[in-house]
Image (cartoon, coloured by chain):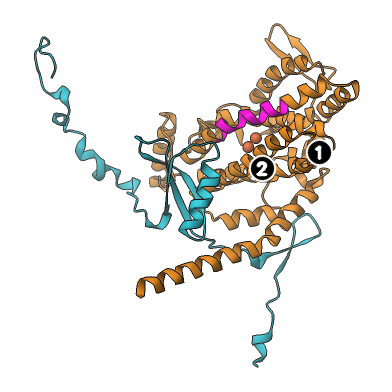
Amino acid sequence: MEKIVDQEAAFQARIDAGEKIEPKDWMPEKYRKTHIRQISQHAHSEIVGMLPEGNWITRTPTLRRKVGLLAKVQDEAGHGLYLYSAAETLGISRDELFHQLHIGKAKYSSIFNYPTMTWADIGAIGWLVDGAAIINQVMLTRTSFGPYARAMVRICKEESFHQRQGYEIMLTLCEGTPEQKAMAQDALNRWWWPSLMMFGPRDAESPNTEQSVKWKIKRKTNDELRQQFIDITIPQAEILGITVPDPDLKWNEERQHYDFGEIDWDEFWQVVKGNGPCNKERLQARNDAWNNGAWVRNAARAHAEKRAEKERTAEAS
Amino acid sequence: MQKNERKKKEPQKQANLFTNYTIITNQYNMKGNPIWEVFIRSKNGLEHRHVGSLHAEDAKMAMENARDVYTRRQEGVSIWVVESKHITASNPSENGEMFDPAKDKAYRHPTFYDLPDELEHI
Ligand SMILES: [Fe+2]
Ligand SMILES: [Fe+2]
């Protein structure tokens, strides 16, 4: 018992000194579990996040938009793969991670349980959802667990194009016909609040935050990140000439930040619990993809075995 | 023909936690396919660097996956893939005996040797 206490103190000292933790290092069981949970939730979010945008790949207004969106969605698949790899270094298998997602046990970002109803939603997602993700992910490039931090560096390099392609979609709509601009405004109206919810519950209602900050998993609290997002996004909305659906939003000269209205936390928890507009659809899509892809996995294995067999006979002769 | 030979293996169904459809659980191979470590040379003249890992059934597919996952933006001119199980790693809990012996050997560094300031090109 005393040994564990010593080890934990030594571990905390390493973190406090700014050292990174690598997979084979000793770590408290809770640090390992928290990371498996957080990294895999993050990975699932990247993968499920492909679904709402994938919905529009065949219906983009131009070929330019199509190659951009396709590349973005492909990147998200890559992000999922980097993150699953990072989670696996902690001793959990890829299939186990998928399994937890497919049975609805693992969580992913609730934002992806909202539908993409118009083309403007693709613009709003790139601008707001990727924008919010970037703020979180930039912080995570300095997280204490090495493989997670390295995955984040790679991901952040790729994200900025995502946000720019989204903003360009919004800009084009806002410079278009009144109907197109109204479409952009409507998308902002629907995506604004869910985007703010992406940063998670208020600090006061976020029991894990303290431990996460202590372990340098998080370096800023949910509320700090949310404020940062609002402060940089409002001027971007002004350039577009559209407004966020918050009558209480106001610049606070004294705080040097925007004040904003109350988030509907009821809605947040409802979506987390599985009652969002698309929770069932998303999970069904992932299960279908897994089940319908079984023959591909089997074929790959059969092919590998055949190829190995051929090499063996070639060597023997 | 034997009776149990014909018996088709029924997929095991497991109820989803919060939806009413079922998922087919025996399609999970919990031990999965092999993991490969990926190393990329970003340009000639530089060394290959570890960039991450991936799953693939064999080396050829690992190489194809590495191309798609890790070089979507011309990040490399050369890729190595090595099945993870072939890597022998040092154990961090033995770092003391492993690396500490080099600690007190300052004489392996140029600054250990006292030479006059006016001396040049050495
Ligand atoms: Fe991403
Ligand atoms: Fe993204």
- Please give the residue where the numbered disc 2 appears in the rendered image: A45
Q: Is mark 2 within 8 Å of ligand 1?
A: yes
Magenta highlight: main SS: helix
The disc numbered 2 marks a residue on which chain? A
Q: Which residues are magenta?
A: A155-167
The stretch drawn in magenta includes residue A159: yes
For image coordinates 55% across by 28% down, the residue present is A219
Give coordinates of residue A13: x percent, y percent.
41, 33
**Closer-to-camera residue (A272/A296):** A296
On whether residue A239 falls in the magenta region, the answer is no
Q: SS at mark 1?
A: loop
Outermost residue on the top side: it is: A253
Chain letter tied to orange = A
Q: Is residue A210 left or right of residue B81?
A: right
Rendered residue at 40%/74% (across/down): A313
**Looking at the image, is mark 2 or mark 1 earlier in the sequence?**
2
Let me know if marks 2 and 1 both belong to one chain. yes
The relative height of residue A105 versus residue A220 in the rendered view (above or below) is below
Query: Taking B6 as reference, is A270 above or below it?
Result: above
Q: Which one is nearer the viewer's eye here, A189 or A240?
A: A240
Label 1 beta carbon less than 8 Å to ligand 2: no
Q: For the residue labelled by badge 2, is the local secondary structure a helix, a strand or a loop?
A: helix
**Nearer to us in this view, A98 or A38:** A98
The colour applied to the residues of chain B in this rendering is cyan
To which residue does mark 1 refer? A116
Residue at 23% from the left image edge and 39% from the top image edge: B100
Q: Quadrant of the C terminus of chain B?
A: top left
Decide: few, some or many residues near mark 1? Use Cα within 10 Å; few <14, some 14-19, many ≥20: many
- Residue lying farthest to the bottom in this orientation: B1
